[in-house]
Image (cartoon, grey):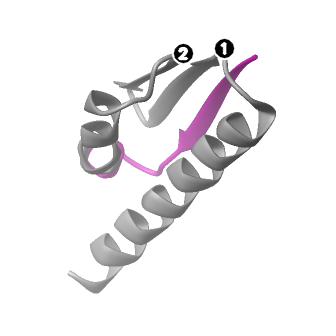
Amino acid sequence: MQATITLKYQNQKTAQAIAQAISPDNLKTPPGLQIQTLKENTKVLTKIHCESKLSTFTATIDDLLFCASVAEKTLKTM
């Protein structure tokens, strides 16, 4: 299973901050799961490749979106 999650922001500074906030999760993945996050201009792209269970795949997407949401809320309060 594969997915690319694209999040678009109003400026590159915000996109960079979000990308950095969610990228540390890329380092710890179980076997069969690969996650890559990168910034392209005002977009944050996360590519997910999962050779495991559907539940792992959907939980990964849910976790990614939750982390991005928390990072967005944190930026708004600063």
- C-alpha gap between disc 2 and disc 1: 5 Å
Asked if residue 13 is among those painted magenta in the image, a careful observer would answer yes
Q: Residue at position x 63%, y 33% from top?
A: 5
- Chain part drawn in magenta: 1-15
Judge the density around disc 2: few (<14), some (14-19), many (≥20) Cα neighbours within 10 Å. Answer: few
- Mark 2 touches mark 1? (CB < 8 Å): yes
14 is higher (above) or lower (below) than 49: below
Q: Which mark is residue 37?
A: none
**Residue 71 rendering spot, x and y as whole percentages:** 36, 64
List x then y, in percent, for residue 36.
41, 21
Identify the residue shown where x is 55% and y is 21%.
47
Q: Position of residue 25 (x, y in %)?
A: 33, 41
Whether residue 30 is visible, yes or no, is yes
Residue 12 located within the stretch drawn in magenta: yes
Does 7 appear above or below 45? Answer: below
Q: Judge from the rendering whether residue 21 lies leftward or rightward of residue 41; answer left or right.
A: left
Callout 2: helix, strand or loop? loop
Using the image as rendered, state which of residue 61 and residue 30 is in the foreground: 30
Does residue 60 appear to the left or right of 39 in the view shown?
right
Q: Which mark is residue 32?
A: 2
Residue at image coords 43%, 36%: 42
- The residue under label 1 is 51
Q: Position of residue 46 (x, y in %)?
A: 51, 28
What residue type is disc 2 on?
Gly
Give the amino acid at mark 1.
Glu
Q: Nearer the viewer, residue 59 or 4?
A: 59
Q: Is residue 35 left or right of residue 61?
A: left
